[in-house]
Image (cartoon, helix red, strand yellow):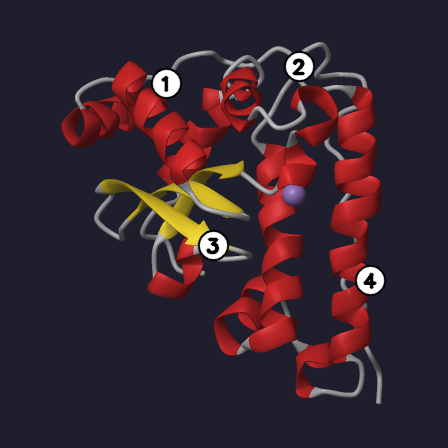
Amino acid sequence: MTTKKIQLSPLPYAEQALEPHISAETLHYHHDKHMAAYVDKLNTLIADTPFAEASSLEEIILQSEGAIFNNAAQAWNHAFYFEQFHPKPKREPEGELKAAIEKAFGSVEQLREQLERDAVALFGSGWVWLAADKHGELSIVSKPNAGNPLTEGMYPLLTIDVWEHAYYIDHRNARATGVKALWEVLCWGKIEHRYSQVGRNR
Ligand code: MN
């Protein structure tokens, strides 16, 4: 049986590129140790199962449960998380995304505040998402552990990783300041691009 290995996607910038907002040490551990471990574990788990022939991580996420789901979703979530940052980010959304944010949350600032509140409020490990339904309506979705709104037919746009490994090196126990630092490197141009894909087949 041939096995297609799931590859570890590279960081889309250098480890030090997001300093001082996210340290090189955090990115090194987060990508090369934590994310890599999920990818390695997933490859071990799917070897000699039908999932070894899956054409994408999304396909595995939508069809699996238990340990395979957890490791596939963690691999996908981390690639999605790292891709949304940029050393010179577009700092505010425009156009259709901005209009949808204002409709759902009142303002971009109110969205940021709600995401921060929900990230602090999520007990234990997990992910807080800004996601769209197929009509482009926005909502915030909090998920424990590896949870991901793809499983509800939604389109993820932005995510905050609230696992301690995401912030403990730079912020120790202070999850709130770790979340606030993300706005300094979050690229709204990338979120606008994701929003432009909402409703497309996948
Ligand atoms: Mn993480």
Q: Position of residue 51 (x, y in %)?
A: 67, 80
Q: Are marks 3 and 2 in contact (CB under 8 Å)?
A: no
User: Is 28 drawn above or below residue 35 in the view shown?
Assistant: above
In whole angstroms, how far apart are the C-alphas of marks 4 and 2?
28 Å
**Which disc, if any, is residue 93?**
1
1 or 4: mark nearer the eye: 4
Q: Earlier in the sequence, mark 4 or mark 2?
A: 4
Residue at position x 60%, y 25% from top? 85
Residue identifier under label 2: 87
4 or 2: mark nearer the eye: 4
Query: In terms of secondary structure, where does tag 2 sit?
Result: loop
Residue identifier under label 4: 40
In whole angstroms, how far apart are the C-alphas of marks 3 and 4?
22 Å
In whole angstroms, how far apart are the C-alphas of marks 3 and 2?
29 Å
11 on left or right of 145: right
**Which disc, if any, is residue 24?**
none
Question: Which amino acid, by three-letter code, is at mark 2?
Answer: Pro
In whole angstroms, how far apart are the C-alphas of marks 1 and 4?
36 Å
Badge 2 density bin: few <14, some 14–19, many ≥20, Cα 10 Å: some
Q: Earlier in the sequence, mark 3 or mark 1?
A: 1
